[in-house]
Image (tube, rainbow, N blue to C red):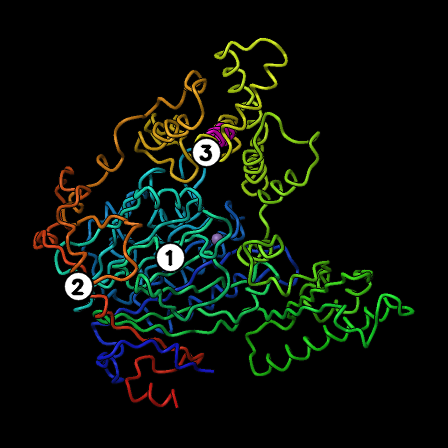
């Protein structure tokens, strides 16, 4: 059960071995969890309480282990607009577990007005004199609970403004990201916590490629900081730019907490190129019946002491068991073939037996685990290619109604024999792609729309709208309840096209057809297209607010109300995104485009948000800009040259701030930390009571 290879050791790390140093005043204890998806299937009679039960278990772990704080990697909520029940349950539990008199043992050294710059109370909740916090929660947002609307608020912001959660990592710009860490200190341990809330993968990918993602570092004592980064993106490759390669992330990072991927791969894996570790805690509730969700679910207890870390797995016992099995009917020629009399009945009986097997296994496993729900999730994927017929699944379901949590969809018929052989080649095979997708989120509406148009005949192809736009509009309609999304997209794109035609002076019917086609094709997959879609979606939101559908509170700043740049980051600072984005798109699009460059785009061009909103802390940091061309292996000394980097934000305005005095001591000296000095080892054991800081002796024992 315990693999020696998982005990990733760097030689000469042994000071954490003795028991009495484990939870000393220098050790930061962090509970790590992600994708809790509160409210998932909350209306389901059987599974409705699952996400809440597990959240409670997570908070109980935090309390039991007396962690310094909880770190969440996004998607705390399943719905963008959580139900009243959901918010109520969440707030109730946070109050129960995270408030109290227990003193907080760590300090924050960074400028909190920068760290929490998108929140109304830009300081950590436990330092708020009106609140009594015992366990601070730090969270980035995910793609499910991402900020929307003209105010750019997400469900987490409700928790943030009520003092229950510290929402961080909300970047305001769509073209350039600067991540300023929350600097924490407990005893001699210094932790730099970086976070980046969910951003559409393609966009973030592009920003990385264009060197527009920068992580700031304290100038002094760089080698002393433990650098922890949490993000919420695709980690596995879904498409050419539809994920974030680990190599994009800065190599000074020590540990990445990767949210969004639902498979629990919490034992940190080492990226040999960047020499950091990645832990993927996975979701704490299965939101799809795919293999990735069937792995046993855990959260992590991360201990950081100086530059050493240890990650202990904590098994989630409230998680409903999930068993999945594949059968390929053609493989059972000794039992039946398509020509066998009553073959369909035989196949059904065969499947019945398979499901029973899984149920028996589930029951054995559940023995002595009272917190585990009684009825498991079961999925049998039946490949019936080769002439077999599918049997009636509703009759089949009836037999398991009392024993399975998902009786209605136990059996899933497929017709792809290749599935098994090609499973590794997920990029080239449609089916593989499909499976990969479902591991994370279930199929997205957007993808379904795309698939539809890919397969559709010529006469039903879109001629004016783009597939991506249509997909996005429908996605918004479904996911975020934007009732006007589709209508807005149509009228917006229609308007733009008309303007384009006018500008081109096209008059004959034939020319119009051709020009429309050109215009549409020129936009495909460009920033221009993306911005257009955003604009349309924002109009839909604006309309909703005008109508008063959304009792949104308005910020007093008039600019904000009309600022409709971007779903994810529509916060006060003006001047990001659209101006530059359009410019870029325009380039790829031919001359006519310029003529239609009227309206909202011009708003807020120019100034960079960073200059206006960043403050003294920036001077204490030096930029470590992304270099995609970084050599695969490097000598430490090779990269200690960032002093001269033009990106260093030394020209930024200074704002006096108490906290910033802590940075006074930082010099401009820069030195990349020695990667080989990373002191890391992990406990891969399931036993939550295990002493996590076993030293070499303990580890030796394990290997034998
Ligand atoms: Mn997610």
Residue 49 position within the rendered picture, expressed as x and y whole percent measured from the top left: 57, 62
- Residue mark closest to the camera, 3 vs 2: 3
Q: Which residue is drawn at 38% across and 42% down?
A: 206
Q: Measure how far apart labels 2 and 1 are at the Cα level.
A: 22 Å
User: Tag 2's secondary structure?
Assistant: helix
Above or below for 235 versus 478: below
Neighbour tally class for label 2: few under 14, some 14-19, many 20 plus, Cα within 10 Å: some
Q: Quadrant of the C terminus?
A: bottom left
The number of callouts visible is 3
Above or below for 473 versus 519: below
Residue 171 position within the rendered picture, expressed as x and y whole percent measured from the top left: 33, 43
Q: Is residue 410 visible?
A: yes
What type of secondary structure mainly makes up the magenta span?
Answer: helix
Q: Which of 105 and 407 is in front in this view?
A: 407
Q: Residue at x 63, y 77 (%)?
A: 362
For the residues bearing labels 3 and 2, Cβ distance under 8 angstroms: no
Which residues make up the magenta segment?
531-541
Query: Is residue 534 covered in magenta?
Result: yes
Q: Residue at x 54, y 33 (%)?
A: 469
For the residues bearing labels 2 and 1, Cβ distance under 8 angstroms: no
Residue underneath mark 3: 526
Neighbour tally class for label 3: few under 14, some 14-19, many 20 plus, Cα within 10 Å: some
Q: Which residue is drawn at 31% across and 29% down?
A: 575
Q: Is residue 211 left or right of residue 223?
A: right
User: Tag 3's secondary structure?
Assistant: loop
First in residue order: circle 3 vs circle 1: 1
Residue 373 position within the rendered picture, expressed as x and y whole percent measured from the top left: 60, 71
């Amino acid at each position: 059960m315990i693999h020696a290879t998982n005990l990733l050791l760097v030689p000469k790390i042994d000071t954490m071995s003795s028991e009495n140093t484990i939870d000393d005043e220098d050790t930061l204890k962090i509970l790590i969890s992600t994708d809790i998806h509160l409210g998932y299937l909350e209306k389901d009679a059987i599974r409705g309480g699952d996400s809440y039960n597990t959240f409670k278990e997570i908070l109980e772990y935090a309390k039991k282990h007396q962690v310094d704080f909880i770190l969440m990697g996004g998607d705390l909520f399943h719905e963008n607009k959580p139900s009243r029940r959901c918010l109520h349950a969440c707030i109730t539990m946070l109050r129960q577990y995270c408030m109290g008199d227990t003193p907080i043992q760590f300090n924050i050294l960074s400028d909190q007005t920068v760290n929490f710059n998108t929140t109304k109370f830009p300081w950590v909740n436990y330092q708020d004199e009106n609140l009594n916090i015992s366990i601070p929660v730090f969270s980035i947002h995910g793609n499910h609970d991402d900020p929307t609307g003209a105010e750019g608020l997400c469900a987490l912001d409700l928790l943030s403004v009520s003092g229950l959660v510290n929402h961080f990592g909300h970047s305001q710009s769509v073209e350039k990201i600067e991540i300023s860490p929350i600097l924490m200190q407990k005893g001699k341990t210094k932790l730099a916590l970086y976070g980046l809330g969910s951003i559409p993968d393609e966009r973030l990918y592009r920003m990385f490629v264009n060197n527009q993602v920068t992580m700031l570092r304290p100038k002094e004592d760089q080698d002393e900081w433990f650098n922890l980064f949490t993000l919420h993106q695709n980690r596995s490759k879904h498409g050419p730019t539809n994920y974030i390669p680990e190599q994009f992330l800065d190599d000074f990072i020590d540990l990445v907490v990767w949210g969004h991927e639902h498979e629990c791969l919490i034992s940190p894996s080492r990226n040999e190129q960047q020499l950091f570790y990645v832990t993927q805690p996975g979701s704490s509730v299965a939101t799809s019946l795919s293999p990735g969700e069937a792995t046993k679910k855990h959260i992590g207890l991360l201990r950081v002491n100086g530059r050493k870390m240890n990650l202990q797995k904590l098994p989630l016992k409230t998680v409903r068991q999930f068993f999945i099995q594949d059968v390929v009917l053609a493989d059972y020629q000794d039992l039946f073939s398509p020509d066998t009399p009553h073959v369909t009945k035989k196949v059904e009986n065969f499947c019945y037996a398979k499901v029973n097997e899984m149920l028996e296994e589930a029951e054995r496993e559940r023995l002595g685990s009272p917190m585990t729900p009684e009825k498991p999730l079961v999925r049998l994927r039946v490949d019936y290619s080769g002439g077999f017929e599918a049997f009636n699944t509703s009759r089949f379901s009836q037999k398991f109604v009392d024993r399975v949590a998902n009786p209605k969809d136990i059996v899933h018929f497929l017709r792809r024999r290749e599935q098994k052989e090609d499973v590794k080649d997920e990029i080239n095979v449609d089916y593989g792609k499909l499976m990969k997708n479902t591991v994370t989120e279930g199929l997205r509406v957007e993808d379904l729309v795309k698939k539809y148009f890919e397969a559709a005949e010529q006469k039903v192809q879109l001629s004016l709208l783009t597939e991506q736009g249509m997909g996005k509009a429908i996605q918004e309609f479904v996911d975020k309840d934007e009732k006007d999304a589709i209508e807005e997209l149509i009228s917006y794109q229609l308007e733009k096209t008309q303007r384009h035609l006018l500008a081109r002076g096209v008059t004959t019917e034939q020319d119009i057809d051709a020009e429309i086609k050109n215009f549409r094709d020129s936009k495909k997959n460009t920033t221009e297209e993306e911005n257009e879609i955003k604009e349309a979606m924002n109009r839909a939101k604006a309309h909703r607010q005008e109508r008063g559908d959304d009792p949104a509170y308005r910020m007093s700043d008039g600019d904000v109300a009309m600022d409709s740049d971007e779903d994810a980051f529509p916060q006060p600072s003006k001047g990001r995104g659209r101006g530059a984005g359009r410019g870029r798109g325009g380039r790829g699009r031919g001359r006519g485009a310029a003529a239609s460059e009227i309206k909202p785009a011009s708003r807020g061009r120019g100034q960079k948000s960073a200059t206006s909103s960043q403050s003294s802390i920036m001077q204490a940091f030096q930029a470590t800009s992304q270099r995609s061309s970084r050599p695969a292996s490097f000598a430490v000394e090779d990269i200690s040259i960032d002093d001269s980097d033009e990106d260093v934000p030394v020209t930024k305005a200074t704002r006096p701030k108490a906290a910033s005095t802590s940075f006074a001591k930082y010099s401009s000296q820069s030195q990349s930390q020695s990667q080989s000095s990373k002191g890391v080892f992990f406990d891969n054991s399931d036993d939550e009571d295990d002493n996590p800081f076993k030293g070499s002796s303990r580890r030796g024992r394990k290997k034998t």
